[in-house]
Image (cartoon, rainbow, N blue to C red):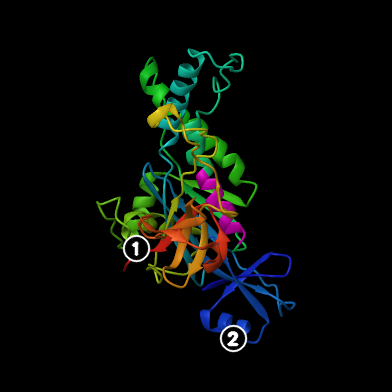
Amino acid sequence: MVPVVDKQQKPLMPCSEKRARQMVISRKATPFWKKGVFCIRLNVEPSARNLQQVVVGIDPGSKKEGLTVKSKAHTYLNVQADAITWVKEHVKLRRIMRKARRHRKTPYRECRNNRTMNCLPPSTKARWQWKLRLITWFSEMYPITDFIVEDANAITKKNCSKWNGNFSPIKIGKNWFYSQIKKFGNLSLRKGWDTKTLRDKGGLGKSSNKMRDSFDSHCVDSWVLANEIAQGHTKPENKRVLCVVPLRFHRRQLHRIVPSKGGKRPSYGGTRSLGLKRGSLVQNPKYGLAYVGGSSKNRISLHSLRDGKRLSTSVKVSDCKVLSFGGTRAYWAEV
């Protein structure tokens, strides 16, 4: 099923691939990419704007998480997303570098109060913000009405500061996420044992390998959650999984940590390569679909969508057709 939007970018009910192809050929619609997902935009007024109930099921996880977009008639999208896990180490390294600069004879700003005290830790906030960005992405393609989330069980204990200290960021983070998600639609919560009951009721199994790119790893839970509200199926009719990996950008890193030979520190980081945004999805005649990496000697590098490996470091910008920018790499899991 292909996502459809009108002239004002307002999402409508998706259509079949055959119908989307016919509308593109007749120029009633224009094809475009939305962060790795093929969509169409209508050039004419739609014949009807009848919208159905579209539900998003979310199964949070520490390393990977599952999300499913479903209505009563179809399962539109199954997404297995990698969680953001590098923020904690990045903040730690930033603190070390800042302290090292203050011991050298170099200008620096005056010390300020710790702005991260008594608030959501950066690593926890980044995890929940990533889920919110995925939901925003879905809402731009589908007319979503409801959300159902497997609630993380973060129970505090009396007179146990170590236990409460580990779980309080999770509790604060999920409460912040729930307050934000209510702006998009209705929110329902389920516990982990509720998800297992729904899975057993449908005779569905879950893989023990949580790092595997498959429907049974995480999306089976998000599917049964979405199906509880949307109804319409007893078994999943669509097990295709779109794997989404967030790209890590070094936006403000002025130089590498270890100096090069001669004591010089070359510039490092940035988000643009010869005028193109890094992470942009491009079409190249030789390498096909890839995303943009760094640049050197008036050439850009292209990376594989499946594993992120560098395909080439000497590609001309004129040989690439920019399809979309997403800040992620997305690929379909092998069935």
Q: Is residue 118 magenta?
A: no
43 vs 270, nearest the viewer: 270
Identify the main secondary structure in magenta.
Answer: helix
Q: Is residue 135 magenta?
A: yes
Q: Amino acid at mark 2?
A: Gln
Viewer-nearest of discs 2 and 1: 2
Q: Earlier in the sequence, mark 2 or mark 1?
A: 2
| Position of 108 relative to 177 (above/below) | above
26 vs 4, nearest the viewer: 26
- Residue at point 35% right, 64% down? 333
User: Which residue in the protein does label 2 denote?
Assistant: 22
> Looking at the rendering, which quadrant does residue 33 occupy?
bottom right
Q: Amino acid at mark 1?
A: Gly
Q: CA distance from mark 2 to mark 1?
A: 37 Å
Residue 333, numbered label: none
Residue 184 in sight here: yes
Residue 202, numbered label: 1
Quadrant in which the C terminus is drawn: bottom left
Q: Residues within 10 Å of mark 2 (few under 14, many from 20)?
A: few
Q: Residue furthest front?
A: 262
- Residue at point 43% right, 21% down? 96
| Residues drawn in magenta | 130-140
Secondary structure under tag 2 reads: helix
Residue 203 locus on image (x, y percent): 30, 63
20 vs 233, nearest the viewer: 20
